[in-house]
Amino acid sequence: MLFALSSFPIPQSPNRNQIHNVKPQSSETLKIDLLRNFNSPFELRQVHAQIIKTNAPLSILPLTRVGLVCAFTPSFHYAQQIFKCVEKQKPETFVWNSCLKALAEGDSPIDAIMLFYRLRQYDVCPDTFTCSSVLRACLNLLDLSNGRILHGVVEKVGFRSNLYLQNMIVHLYASCGEMGEARLLFEKMPQRDVVTWNIMIAQLIKQGDHEGAYDLFSRMPERNVRSWTSMIAGYVQCGKAKEAIHLFAKMEEAGVKCNEVTVVAVLAACADLGALDLGMRIHEYSNRHGFKRNVRISNTLIDMYVKCGCLEEACKVFEEMEERTVVSWSAMIGGLAMHGRAEEALRLFSDMSQVGIEPNGVTFIGLLHACSHMGLISEGRRFFASMTRDYGIIPQIEHYGCMVDLLSRAGLLHEAHEFILNMPMKPNGVVWGALLGACRVHKNVEMAEEAIKHLLELDPLNDGYYVVLSNIYAEAGRWEDTARVRKFMKDRQVKKTPGWSSITVDGVVHEFVAGEESHPDTEQIFQRWEELLEEMRLKGYVPNTSVVLLDIEEGEKVKFVSRHSEKLALVFGLMNTPAETPIRIMKNLRICEDCHSAFKLISAIVNREIVVRDRNRFHCFNDNSCSCRDYW
DNA sequence: TTAGGGTTAG
C-alpha cells in the first residue's frame, strides 16, 4: 500500500481541521467503520492515511463504498490504486463488480451502466460478473440499446458459453418485447438449463401467449417447483384459474412440493373460482410448512376467504397477522365493502390510520365501494376529496367509476352525469356502465339512452349493456324498443352471456345454466322447487316477472324466472348438504331481483345461511333478510 | 458478488 497519496487528484476540502478529528485506529473493525462512514473523496484521503498507518489488508465490503463514492469523481483513479493493493486475484474488477451490483440492484441502475463504460475507458477488464450486473441494470431499466451493446461485449470477450449470461440475455430480449430474438437465441443455445426454460415460459405468459408457454412447459426435459409455479401463476394472471388448479393437481401428482410462491398462486386461483375447499386445504398446508409469517400468503388468504364468502375467516387471518402491510388492510377493507359491511370497513380505515399505515389508491377503491354499496353519499364524497388533499393520491379512472356508481346508485343520476362530463380523463365503459345500471334501478329511460350512446362507441360488442337497456325498456312497457334492441344485437351477432351459477358439494363443482336441464338431478330439483314454492307462497311470495326481458305470456315468464341458475344451484345445495350449514353459490352475472327476494324467504323457511357471490358483490341471506339491506 | 415464479382494485 505504499504509494503517494498526493500523486492522484483529490478534491481539496476547505476544512483541513477534519484531518485532526480522525483518531488513530488499531483494529480491522475500526478501519472498516472508517471506510463505511466517509462521504467524499476528500474524507477518503484522511481515512486512507489512517489505514496506511495501521497497515493491515482491507476486506471488500468497505471498499465497495470507496468505489461508489469515487466512481464518478476525479478520484476514480485513486480508488483504482487502492483496489489494486488489496486482493491477490483480479482485485480491481472484483471490487468494481461489487459496486456495479449495488447500483444495478439499487435505485440507480443507470449508474451501473455509466460505471461500466467508465471502467472500459480506464481499461478495467470485465469478467462474467461485470457483465451479469450490467445486464441486470439493463433488465431493470428495460434498456435494450445498452443491452445489445452488452450482448456484443459478452460475445466479443468470449463468454458465449456462460449459461448464466446467456440466460440473462434471453431474459433481457424477452422482457424488452423482442420475443422473436429471445426465441432465436433460445433455439440456438448450445445448452440450456431449467432456468432458461423457466425464463421463456414466464416471458411467454407475460406476453399473453399461454399456449406457447404451455407448449414449452410440456416439452422441457426437467421441471422444478419454479417451472410449475410460473405456469400456475401465469394461468392465474390471465384469468385461467381453472387451468391453474388443474395444473396444481398435476404438480401434486408429480410429487413436487410447493413453496410460498406456489401457495400464493394457488390461493389466488381459489379466490377467483370461489374454491373454498381447496383454499382451506392450502391454508392448512401453508401453516404446516411454517409459512404462517409470510405476509403475502396471509394477504392472499384474506382475499381468498373474502371471495369465498367466509368473511369471518378472513378477519381471523387478518387479526392473527404479526405484521400487516397496506395490502393486508386494503384487502380487508375491500372485503368488508364487498360484503356490505361499510361501517366496519370505515372503522378499519381509521384503525389503519392510527397505526400509521399510509393508504394507497386501492385502499380508497375499497372505501368508495363500501360507501357505494351502502349509500353513504357524504362519506364517499369526503373520501374522494381526501385522497388527493390528505394523501396526495391522484384519483384514477377506477376511483371516478366508484364515484359515478355511488352517486347514480343513490338516484343522483344528473349529478353523476355531470361528474362524468367533468372527469379529467375519457370515461370508459365501466363509468358509463355504472350510470346505465343505476338508470335501470331508478327507471330513467332518457339517461339510459345517453349512457348507451357512449357505450356503443366504447364497447359495441358487450352484451351486458344491451341486456340492461332492453330490460329498462321492458320495465317501462316499451316492447317495441325492447325488440329493437334485440334486433340490434342479432344484427351485430352479439349474444347474451348465459347466466350460470355454481355450487361445490363434497369437493365437486356443480354448474347450472339458466333454463338448461342438463344436470342429471334436474327432475328432483324441479320437484323440490315446487314444494318450496308452496311454502314461499304462503309467506307472500309472488314471482317478479319484470326481470324477464321477453315479450311473452305471464305464465311463461314465471317458468322463466323459476329456472334461473342461482335457484337451481340453491335447490341442489339444499338437497345435498347437511342442514344448518351455509350454502355458498357463485354467479357469473348479477343476481336478479326475483332470486333476491326468493332467497331471503328461503333462508327463513329452511333456516340456513345462503351466501351468493355475484359479479359485483356478496349477498348473505339470513332469516328473511340480506346483508346488502336491499341496496344493490 | 452473477439467472427464473408471488398479495389488495377488475
Image (spheres, coloured by chain):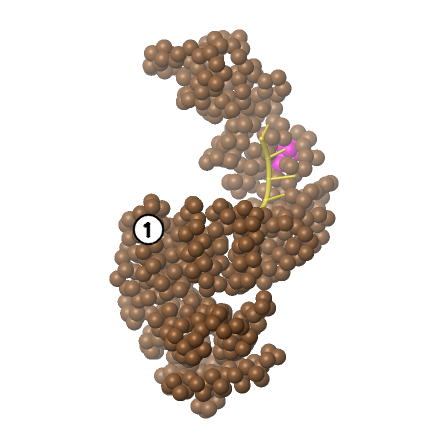
Chain colours: A brown, B yellow
Residue plotted at (51% across, 78% down): A571
Q: Position of residue A368 (x, y in %)?
A: 34, 60
Amino acid type, mark 1: Asp
Q: Position of residue A160 (x, y in %)?
A: 69, 35
Q: Quadrant of residue A282?
A: bottom right
Quarter of the image that includes the N terminus of chain A: top right
How many marks do you count on the picture? 1
Magenta segment's dominant SS is helix
Label 1 chain ID: A
- The magenta-colored residue range is A150-156
| A81 to the left or right of A201 | left
Per the image, the residue denoted by label 1 is A351
Q: Kindly tell me whether residue A230 is visible in this rendering.
A: no
Q: Position of residue A383 (x, y in %)?
A: 30, 56
| A331 to the left or right of A129 | left
Q: Position of residue A510 (x, y in %)?
A: 57, 72
| B2 to the left or right of A472 | right
Neighbour tally class for label 1: few under 14, some 14-19, many 20 plus, Cα within 10 Å: few
Above or below A283: residue A582? below
Above or below A135: residue A562? below
Q: Quadrant of residue A477?
A: bottom left
Residue plotted at (28% across, 55% down): A385
Residue toward you, A234 or A137: A234
Q: Residue furthest front?
A: A579
The verdict on residue A153 being magenta is yes
Question: Label 1's element?
Answer: helix
Q: Kindly tell me whether residue A364 is visible in this rendering.
A: yes
Residue plotted at (56% across, 57% down): A281
The verdict on residue A359 being magenta is no
Above or below A46: residue A346? below
